[in-house]
Amino acid sequence: MIHIIESLDSGAVEAWLLRMLKAGKKFGAELDWTFYSVLQRPGRFDQVARDLGARVINSPVALDEKYSFVRALRRELKRGRYEVLHCHHDLVSAVYLAAAVGLPISRRIVHVHNADLHVPTGNPRKSALLREPMRRLCLLLADKIVGISNYTLDHFISNCARKPRRDVVLYYGIDTAPYHETPPCRQALRSSLDLPESAIVLIFAGRMVEYKNPLFLIDILDEIAEEEPDAYAVFAGTGPLEEKVRDRARWRGVEDRVRVLGWREDTIALMRGADLFVFPRVEETTADVGREGLGLVVVEAQAAGLPSLLSRGIPEDAIVDTTLCSTLSLAEGANAWGARARTILASPRPDREVGLAAIESSAFSLEKGFRNLVALHRP
């Protein structure tokens, strides 16, 4: 089978696929996979995939060169005689399906990984014109439409009645083995972040972009700064708002209580050492940006046993342990969010093992996620 992806870099989709590739070895069901990257340059984890037994192909033609790209992909689809075509590029999957028209491929899957029905073109008008035709082409040519949450799937099929044989929700399986390891010493973690031992850590983890709303955590910190002199905000993630977060912190006068870490490989350790996870994803749906597709980081926070304060832009699917998760509308404002954060911080710390057990017994477990993915590929 062949997976069409953007690139084997540090994206959540590609990380999940590599996790499933490793799971195949763990569960004695090795996978015969080819990754076709639409980017011409090598990906960061190309060799990791090859070491796990997969084949990795970087497109010889840029996606912008539409006709040449389609011809190149079609040549590979013919050469490889793939039985399954699994497209991971939301609306753009229409291009890959078009390249496969008429070929003897038994299963054609469009996997929708977010609710942002965005066509990547620099022309907003062109993007708006292409959005609906590309969505309809996906629905016409695919025999499976897979969403990472109920909301994502329903949003993609435009809230029409689901077709039972076509429309499926498939949750990411996460590897919980790292959560069983001895967590880092609380003091050591704080020392590594240049924080005092008494620091109360509010953490944001994710892309630093407008719709993830990281600036709102600065407003929350400002609201509780006087009553919680040991509160600090830590940001783990990269994106165009990194400097704006620093600017907002300076404007609010809390810059000494903010740490912007950039991309981190140790998010699990950070979560296990933090006191509150804050995820204020925007709630409004526009033409290009919808609510959160799933919020895998929310699931990971629960596996870490970390209390979480979430906006209502998070699908209900992501909330497994309701004792760990508190939701609040962004319309309530930073003052209400600050008050809720203080209430959570003042409550007894939950048993971390309870949250981990809840995730491991859910559809997000590594084995269930793997088995469900394998079943999806069967005729």
Image: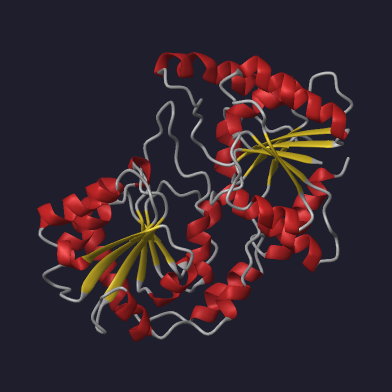
What is the tally of numbered marks visible in this picture? 0
Left/right of residue 306 with respect to residue 195 in the rendered view: right
Asked whether the viewer can see residue 163, the reply is yes
Q: Classify the position of the C terminus by image quarter.
A: top right
Picture quadrant where residue 326 is located: bottom left
Query: In the figure, 312 relative to 127: above or below?
Result: below
Residue 140 appears in the picture as rendered? no
Query: Where is 204 relative to 111, above or below?
Result: below
Question: How has the structure been colored for display?
Answer: secondary structure
Q: Is residue 79 left or right of residue 235?
A: right
Residue at 13% x, 55% y: name it: 250
The residue that appears at 59% across and 18% down in the rendered structure is 65
Give whichever of 334, 232 is nearer the camera.
Answer: 232
Q: Is residue 181 above or below residue 343?
A: below
Foreground pick, 375 / 214 = 214
* Residue 207 place in picture, x, y as percent: 41, 49
The residue at 65%/64% (across/down) is 362
- Residue 189, how many percent across, how many down? 37, 79
Q: Residue at x 69, y 64 (%)?
A: 366
Q: Position of residue 75 (x, y in %)?
A: 80, 24
Q: Give the x, y percent position of residue 258.
A: 23, 64
Q: Quadrant of the N terminus?
A: top right
